Amino acid sequence: LLVTLVVAGIGGGGYALAVCVLIVLTSPGDIRLVRSAVLGQRHLAYVEAAESLGLSRTTVMVRHIWPNVLPVVVANTLLNFAGAIVSLSALSFLGLGV
């Protein structure tokens, strides 16, 4: 919230700037979560079986890994959305949001 506060103060405030800063600040955690979830699925038996059948990496990713990773990503996105609403409310209270 502090970095968002500083950037919003320098940039003149506004909803779009605050949202962009919050997205940039929360992206590394989301990327690490998706990467770890995919790596956790990568060595399971059904993925290795699909690869041994000769399926391409893209097919394995889309048909086998992604459906199992999607619930984790959706849950994390909803939690981040709730946190972003609280952060934007705090910035608005300080006069730097909407």
Image (cartoon, rainbow, N blue to C red):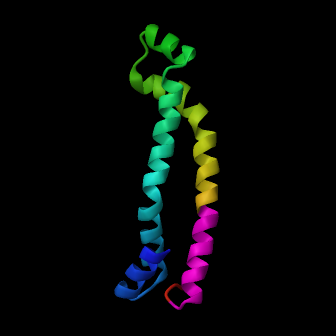
Magenta residue span: 81-95
The x and y percentages for residue 88 are: 56, 77
- Position of 85 relative to 14 (above/below): above
Q: Residue furthest bottom?
A: 95
- Position of 21 relative to 67 (above/below): below
The x and y percentages for residue 74 are: 61, 48
The x and y percentages for residue 32 are: 46, 45
Mark yes or no: residue 74 visible.
Answer: yes
Q: Quadrant of the C terminus?
A: bottom right
Residue at 47 percent of width and 68 percent of height: 22
Q: Residue furthest front?
A: 2
How many marks can you see? 0
Taking depth in this image into account, of 64 and 42 the one nearest to the observer is 42
| Residue 88, magenta (yes or no) | yes
- Position of 31 relative to 84 (above/below): above
- Position of 61 relative to 55 (above/below): below
Q: Residue furthest left?
A: 10
| Residue 58, magenta (yes or no) | no
Residue at 64 percent of width and 65 percent of height: 82
Say which quarter of the image contains residue 58: top left
Residue at 45 percent of width and 39 percent of height: 35
Mark yes or no: residue 16 visible.
Answer: no
The x and y percentages for residue 1 are: 50, 74
Residue at 61 percent of width and 71 percent of height: 85
Q: In terms of secondary structure, what is the magenta stretch mainly? A: helix
